[in-house]
Image: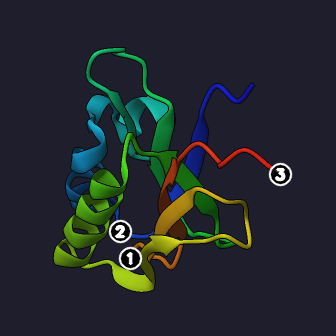
Amino acid sequence: MIDHISVTVSDYETSKRFYEAALKPLGYVVLMEIPREIAGVQVAGFGEAATQKPDFWIASGTPETKTHVAFRANDQATVQRFHEASLAAGGRDNGAPGPRVHYHPGYYGAFVLDPDGHNIEAVHHASAPAGP
């Protein structure tokens, strides 16, 4: 089980604003910030407000690779709100909300590129219909 993940961002303030807006429909907020004086870089931890446990982190630096992170959504409407909020916050479309049956029946996702080109997704897994 994964406890948390971190991505490196080139412009901390821009990325923090992007993720605050993009993840809001999913119930994510900034739960913790660690200043450069302590961590050596600027760090923000996002998570669901109800849990008070950050599980998605951004850290200032030079991104060496592009990352794909998928966030679970409770329904298709939340996936759509994530996509809209992400684009409004400066993200770039990388796959409009819709079914992705090539992954599995009931997979509904949307993809955006953050300011550094990381592929960020919101996905809802509907129950797959029973087989024959």
Residue 88 percent location from the top left of the image: 16, 75
Q: Nearer the viewer, residue 47 or 61?
A: 47
Which circle's residue, 1 or 3, is located before the other in the chain?
1
Relative to 73, 87 lies left or right: left
Q: Nearer the viewer, residue 83 or 129?
A: 129
- Against 121, residue 38 (above or below) is above
Q: Amino acid at mark 2?
A: Asp
Residue 64 percent location from the top left of the image: 68, 71
Q: Residue furthest front?
A: 132
According to the image, label 1 marks what residue?
Answer: 115
Name the quadrant of the N terminus: top right
Which circle's residue, 2 or 3, is located before the other in the chain?
2
- Against 31, residue 86 (above or below) is below
Relative to 106, 88 lies left or right: left
Mark 2 or mark 3, which is nearer to you?
3
Cα–Cα span, label 1 and label 3: 45 Å
According to the image, label 2 marks what residue?
Answer: 11
Whether the residues at callouts 1 and 2 have beta carbons within 8 Å, the answer is yes
According to the image, label 3 marks what residue?
Answer: 132
Which type of secondary structure does the marked residue at label 1 adopt?
Answer: loop
Q: Amino acid at mark 3?
A: Pro
Cα–Cα span, label 1 and label 2: 8 Å
Name the residue rendered at 23%, 48% in the picture: 25
Determine which quarter of the picture holds residue 122.
Answer: bottom left
